[in-house]
């Protein structure tokens, strides 16, 4: 076999970055949430800019229509963005409710990577009551924390305000907003220039990011997963499905002055009928998840993934879920050099496996980087530099791949990139209720008659397409957690309410009530209440052993944004004067095999420990047991007098990272915790 060291372009590596935000506009066209603007100043320019610094490195960027349209609105940010309208005012001019919402939003950053590095931000973040001058400082620090590496390295206004650090004024805010708004308007032209010179290829998504197969026929959800409970009285929205693709192509052409060659179906959701729409409208390629390939080829094995396929003359790239998740979720915890080395080692076996291999690394291009140090700039710079120098790996765009030979698929299984089905968007009572309200509104409009003029009909169409966005159904149910769930709920229902108002009809009372009801407000995390002293035996033997412990419900953190479900679903933790105790619960028996290890990192001390899960014993003073659970006792002496320690855990098998724990970052252990005021029953 030819070794990697002597191979020439034996692996084609296709990076595919998906850029998406839902449509936050209300009936007046005002964006009610600020995430388009914030990711624009941090991610949408930075991602292609870093890539462009390394000749020969290429990638595909997918930009969704709601993102394109909302980026264009920053020609007038005060009129079009509700948050910026409030942010731009002096805090004394705001009502207490509006000021509270602005402060809540300004404290929504990831703490470790965005708040902690900025001294003034860190200070104000912990204040419960802020005076007006402190609010101004918080507002500016929040906005600067969101500024990406390009702005920090190249924009003198941003640099001056970062250096100033505190005591900001209204003039500072106005100057910063003007600077950032101009910058946002440069993003789409920048993509167009990189497309023209061949550095990137561009694709898009059905207009409002809908789950197209569900619009065409809701029963498709049962074909993908027979256990899915469908909403009552579904209506086919196949005409809307066609419009979602047709309108997306029109907007893309208006923006980039050329026809799109490819689509990323929202959430990788595919079936044969949705692919037929793409093909009829001239699309040459799409991409989706490996699970779809493996369900479509029951006799397939892992090596089959590293080829290009087609179905009914439409080329399909199937993403490597594992490689994509490494970048999206695991490498945030690693030193950037270690992460890049790990990635290079992970793709070498693909290059060696057979001739003419292609690997598709497809993931969200915006949300992961705020969990990385310096917004992932060191990681991407090192990775792209390594790849630009490689003789055995060549980065290619999806447009380039679409022009190469492909393997014809005889069958295509319906599903998405989450578990190969549609249960993230349908099946839960809240999700189904949202669909039922959408279907009822569709029936009411259809029964209204033919008296709707073209102008009203177009406005109604706009609201229907917006209400079909996958994001609304994503946040319903208990599988994803956000502090802004009620805001998303209100935005969804408002689209349907506006349809009735356009018809001069009273909206049904059901639409005036929140879909999210009786949801548990209990946090996914509970802090320890009392010292504990469990017996380390790897078994759930006694409730009283862990009574008063802290707990983290990892199942509430599982989502496609945070990879497919890992084996550990719950963490218990606590301590006494002698040791810190950790228990991992879930599918632990599956980890009791050769090659599986648990890596423990004490961040403050840069100490690392590795425990063999197939053969529990005492290592480096750490006592642990693996049976029904993983139970660990870490002696307090290993923390070398720290008052607070942060622990990270990785479950690895060979060179693959199976799960990082906790899912939100690091586990904080207060080693001198005073439980005197804690009590429980």
Image (cartoon, rainbow, N blue to C red):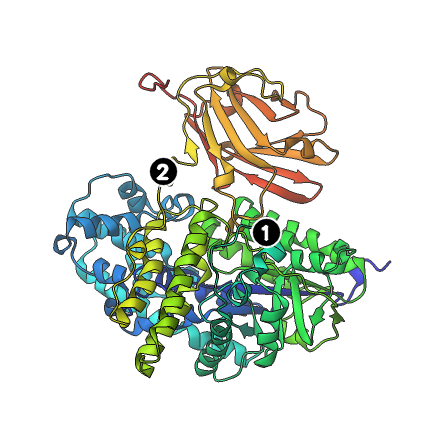
* Residue 325: image tag: 1
Give the vertical position of 124 relative to 640 (above or below). below
The mark lying in front, picked from 1 and 2, is 2
Residue placed most toward the observer, 311 or 636: 311
Residue at image point 59% right, 62% down:
384
Residue placed most toward the observer, 639 or 356: 356
> Which image quadrant is residue 263 in?
bottom right
Label 2 neighbour load within 10 Å: few <14, some 14-19, many 20+: few
Q: Are marks 1 and 2 in contact (CB under 8 Å)?
A: no
Compared across the picture, whether 406 is left or right of 114 comes to: right
Q: In the picture, which quadrant includes the N terminus? A: bottom right
Residue at image point 74% right, 72% down:
406
Q: How many marks?
A: 2
> Which image quadrant is residue 278 in?
bottom right
Q: Does residue 151 appear anywhere in the picture? A: no
Label 1 neighbour load within 10 Å: few <14, some 14-19, many 20+: many
User: Horizontal and vertical percent for residue 610?
Assistant: 64, 31
* Residue 270: image tag: none
> Which image quadrant is residue 10 in?
bottom right
Q: In the picture, which quadrant includes the C terminus? A: top left
User: Horizontal and vertical percent for residue 367?
Assistant: 46, 55
Residue placed most toward the observer, 470 or 85: 470
Q: Considering the numbered disc 2 on the image, is that residue within a helix, a strand or a loop?
A: loop
Give the vertical position of 568 relative to 225 (above or below). above
User: Horizontal and vertical percent for residue 365?
Assistant: 50, 61
In this view, which residue lies farthest toward the bottom? 257
């Amino acid at each position: 076999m030819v070794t990697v060291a002597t191979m020439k372009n034996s692996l084609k590596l296709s990076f595919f970055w998906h850029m998406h935000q839902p449509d936050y506009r209300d009936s007046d066209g005002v964006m009610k949430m600020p995430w388009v603007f914030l990711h624009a100043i941090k991610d949408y320019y930075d991602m292609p800019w870093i890539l462009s610094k390394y000749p020969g490195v290429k990638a595909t960027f997918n930009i969704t229509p709601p993102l394109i349209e909302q980026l264009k609105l920053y020609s007038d940010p005060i009129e079009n963005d509700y948050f910026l309208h409030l942010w731009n005012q002096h805090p004394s001019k705001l009502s207490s409710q509006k000021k509270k919402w602005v402060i809540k939003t300004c404290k929504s950053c990831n703490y470790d990577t965005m708040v902690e590095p900025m001294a003034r931000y860190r200070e104000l973040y912990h204040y419960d009551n802020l005076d007006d001058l402190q609010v101004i400082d918080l507002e500016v620090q929040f906005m600067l924390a969101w500024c990406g590496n390009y702005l920090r390295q190249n924009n003198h206004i941003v640099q001056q305000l970062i250096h100033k650090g505190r005591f900001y004024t209204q003039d500072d805010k106005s100057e910063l907003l003007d600077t950032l708004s101009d910058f946002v308007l440069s993003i789409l032209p920048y993509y167009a220039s990189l497309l023209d010179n061949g550095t990137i290829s561009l694709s898009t998504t059905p207009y409002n990011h809908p789950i197209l197969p569900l619009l065409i026929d809701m029963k498709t959800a049962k074909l993908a997963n027979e256990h899915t409970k469908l909403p009552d009285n579904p209506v086919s929205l196949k005409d809307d499905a066609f419009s979602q693709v047709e309108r997306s192509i029109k907007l893309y052409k208006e923006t980039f002055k050329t026809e799109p060659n490819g689509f990323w179906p929202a959430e990788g959701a595919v079936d044969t009928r949705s692919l037929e729409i793409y093909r009829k409208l001239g699309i040459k390629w799409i991409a989706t998840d490996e699970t779809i390939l493996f369900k479509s080829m029951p006799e397939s094995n892992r090596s089959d993934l590293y080829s290009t396929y087609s179905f009914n003359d439409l080329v399909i790239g199937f993403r490597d879920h594992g490689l994509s998740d490494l970048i999206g979720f695991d490498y945030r915890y690693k030193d950037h050099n270690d992460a890049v080395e790990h990635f290079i080692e992970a793709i070498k076996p693909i290059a060696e496996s057979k001739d003419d291999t292609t690997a598709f690394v497809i993931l969200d291009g915006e949300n992961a980087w705020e969990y990385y140090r310096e917004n992932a700039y060191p990681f991407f710079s090192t990775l792209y530099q390594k790849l630009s120098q490689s003789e055995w790996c060549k980065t290619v765009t999806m447009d380039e791949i679409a022009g190469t030979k492909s393997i014809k698929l005889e069958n295509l299984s319906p599903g998405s990139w989450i578990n190969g089905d549609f249960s993230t968007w349908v099946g839960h009572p809240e999700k189904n209720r949202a669909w039922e309200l959408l279907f009822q509104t569709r029936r009411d409009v259809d029964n209204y008659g033919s008296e709707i003029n073209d102008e009203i009909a177009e406005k109604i169409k706009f609201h229907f397409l917006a209400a079909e966005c996958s994001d609304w159904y994503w946040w319903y149910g208990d599988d994803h957690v956000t502090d802004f769930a009620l805001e998303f709920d209100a935005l969804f229902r408002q689209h349907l309410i506006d349809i009735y108002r356009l018809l001069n009809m009273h909206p049904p009372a059901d639409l005036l009530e929140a879909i999210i009801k009786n949801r548990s407000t209990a946090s996914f995390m509970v802090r320890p209440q009392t010292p504990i002293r469990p017996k380390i035996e790897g078994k759930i033997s006694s409730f009283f052993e862990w009574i008063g412990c802290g707990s983290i419900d990892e199942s509430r953190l599982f989502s496609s944004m945070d990879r497919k479900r890992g084996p550990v679903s719950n963490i218990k933790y606590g301590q006494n004067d002698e040791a810190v105790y950790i228990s991992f619960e879930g599918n632990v028996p599956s980890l009791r095999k050769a090659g599986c290890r648990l890596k423990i990192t004490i961040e403050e001390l840069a100490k690392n420990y590795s425990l063999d899960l197939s053969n529990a014993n005492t290592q480096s003073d750490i006592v642990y047991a693996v049976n029904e659970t993983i139970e660990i006792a870490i002696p307090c002496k290993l923390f070398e007098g720290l008052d607070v320690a942060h622990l990270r855990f990785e479950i690895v098998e060979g060179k693959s990272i199976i799960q990082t724990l906790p899912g939100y970052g690091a586990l904080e252990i207060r080693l001198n915790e005073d439980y005197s005021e804690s009590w429980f029953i």
